[in-house]
Amino acid sequence: IRDHNNGSRGALIVLEGLDRSGKSSQCSRLLSYLVGLGHSAELWRFPDRSTGVGKIISSYLSNNSQLDDHTIHMLFSANRWEKRSLMENKLETGTTLIVDRYSYSGVAFSSAKGLHFEWCKAPEIGLLAPDLVVYLDILPEKAAERGGYGGERYEHLEFQKKVARCYQVLRDSSWEIIDACQPIEDVEKQLKGMVLDCVMACQKGKPLSN
Ligand code: T5A
Ligand code: NA
């Protein structure tokens, strides 16, 4: 296997979308693809349930504990902040990160509860800016048909409809949008093209930003 990343930085690639939109499936396919091409790459996800903060979040999501909406919002953000320096180090030393959910989930899900949009964005300021955000676009009704909403806190059609509207407000022209109702291989094919372009641009010196 060739090493393509000597001296150059990795890319920060984020997948966003409703619950059941296919993020996790696509993230693992992307990881295999990049590693197969000889790139250094890792799969990350938020929430990262393995940390102390992550355990509190996990308990909240599985309805085993209750927390004020503002409190859980800040914990989701803290969970990203506690990974920030490691994230920066990985990127600077040439590892591409494929990240399953990031700040946008934080803002979309909390503002869907009615929290103030700008308030929700504030604690995300200063986290690393993604080089690529891909939104896996699916109607909430279609996502719900994918079986087994696992019974976690936000896995209800009415709430997912609100989240979808918040993502609409949040997204900007830099986002790539993929129709997530296509067959899994078709989604994968489109994603691979976007991701490889992004990885190449970062290798050529595109700066990392906050
Ligand atoms: N949250 C998260 C916040 O409120 N604030 C935050 O700051 C953050 C980071 C975390 C929850 O926390 C919220 C958002 C979430 O509600 P999670 O652990 O990330 O949740 O779980 P989900 O995103 O809900 O993960 P899911 O596994 O449900 O969804 P995925 O990853 O989008 O979907 P995936 O790949 O697991 O696929 C779901 C099913 O669909 C099939 C798969 O085989 C699988 O069965 N599928 C397809 N079927 C047909 N066609 C395709 N193209 C398909 N792609 C996948
Ligand atoms: Na997932």
Image (cartoon, grey):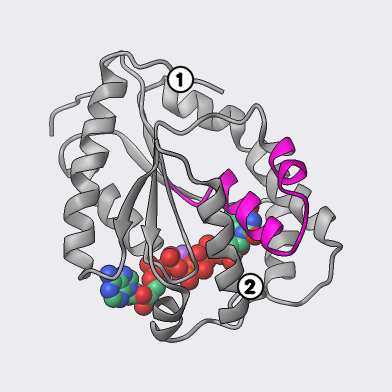
Residue at point 64% right, 60% down?
109
Query: Which amino acid, mark 2?
Result: Tyr
Q: Quadrant of residue 198?
A: top left
Q: Using residue 197 as the reference point, say whether residue 168 is left or right of it.
A: right
> Where residue 154 is drawn, which disc sits there?
2
Q: Nearer the viewer, residue 148 or 17?
A: 17
Q: Is residue 27 above or below residue 90?
A: below
Residue drawn at point x = 37 percent, y = 58 percent: 136
Disc nearer the start of the sequence (2/1)? 2
Label 2 element class:
loop
**Label 2 environment density (alpha carbons within 10 Å; few <14, some 14–19, many ≥20):** some
Look at the magenta stretch and give its main secondary structure.
Answer: helix
Span shown in magenta: 99-122
The reply, left or right, for residue 138 in relation to residue 106 is left
Q: Which mark is residue 208?
A: 1
Q: Quadrant of residue 7?
A: top left
Q: Is mark 2 within 8 Å of ligand 1?
A: yes
Q: Is residue 58 magenta?
A: no
Question: Residue 169: where, in percent of width, then height?
Answer: 56, 50
| C-alpha distance separating marks 2 and 1 | 32 Å
Image coordinates of residue 153 in percent, x first then y, are 67, 75
Q: In the image, which disc is placed on residue 126?
A: none
